[in-house]
Image: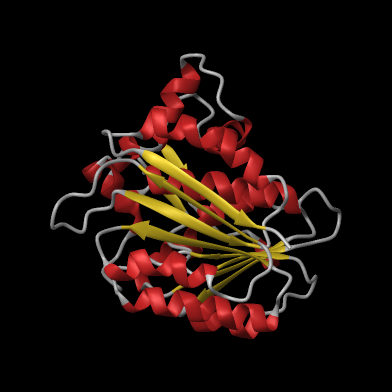
Amino acid sequence: MLSYRHAFHAGNHADVLKHAIVTHLLDYLGQKDKAFWYIDTHAGAGLYALDRGYAAKTSESETGIAPLWRAAAAGTTLPLLLQDYLDQVRTLNPDGELRHYPGSPWLAWQLLREQDRLRLFELHSTEIQVLRDNFRGAGRRVMLYDGDGFSGIKAILPPAPRRALVLVDPSYEDKHDYARTLQCLRDGLQRFATGTYAIWYPQVQRRESLQLPVQLKALPINSWLHVSLTVKHPVPGGLGLHGSGMFIVNPPWTLHAALDTALPTLVDLLGQDGGAAFSLESRQP
């Protein structure tokens, strides 16, 4: 939806799960010398201020990055998956004060090597302009596309180096986004079956939200991982976000163990009531 601005939700519990996983996936891809692409179907603004503007109005970072930040500052030893993610957030906040938050494109930019490339799609007319401003001067390593990422990625798959992470994370405010996400993955796999795809989805009281992970697991995919983080009981009769999930196609072998170690900590630090829980399942060829 063109009214959606991710800045209202920057750094919340869903971002923590998504961005900790994205950091791990990018780190893994970077272990080989060969180049890779990072492709984002719904890039947003890329970079967010937490102490002013939209994010300050909602303070949703208090449900996510802020508790982790404070725990680490207090000397808590966090699982490696979360430490690596926090290291990337610290890069933007070198004085130790949590004021800035990296969206997925900025995390990728921080982890990018000289041979790697970013391909970022954003349909929102205001967000794409902010994204351009944030990446001004980045050069040819970053290409921004003013348009619909669901259909736009067809033209750039398979990527030239035959290695890529594709993140699909629409707002899902439009219920048709669920079906379009499923079709986007089908189309992507037809063009680039060996790529790593990360599908984010919200946990809300909507039939489509419950069906999406079931539909994803039913696809003819040999290797996948599905993780969810619930932070509270659903609000009766409401559509409020009570958690989120990630479905990763062709995940690295390291991800399951890293999440298995990190998820109990996320439940402890981010859980808001007795409904806090996690799930982790995978299929290997």
Q: Nearer the viewer, residue 172 or 88?
A: 172
Q: Is the residue 70 above or below the residue 230 in the image?
A: above
Residue 71 in percent (x, y) is at 45, 21
Q: Closest to the observer: 59 or 185?
A: 185
Count of numbered badges drawn on the protein: 0
Q: Which image quarter is the N terminus in?
A: bottom left
Which residue appears at 62% of the width and 53% of the height? 109
Provide residue 17's location: percent of width, then percent of height.
Answer: 47, 46
Q: Is residue 173 visible?
A: yes
Q: Which residue is depicted at the point 49% across and 50% down?
A: 18
Name the one closer to the observer, 128 or 15: 15
Q: Residue furthest right?
A: 33
Q: Quadrant of the C terminus?
A: bottom right
- Residue 220 placement: quadrant: bottom right
- Counting from the top left corner in percent of width and height, residue 30 is at 76, 51
Seen in the picture, residue 274 relative to 105 is either above or below; the reply is above
- Could you tell me which residue is drawn at 86 percent across and 54 percent down? 33
On the image, the x and y values in percent for residue 107 come to 57, 49
Instruction: Place residue 135 in its image quadrant.
Output: bottom right
Whether residue 102 can be seen here: no
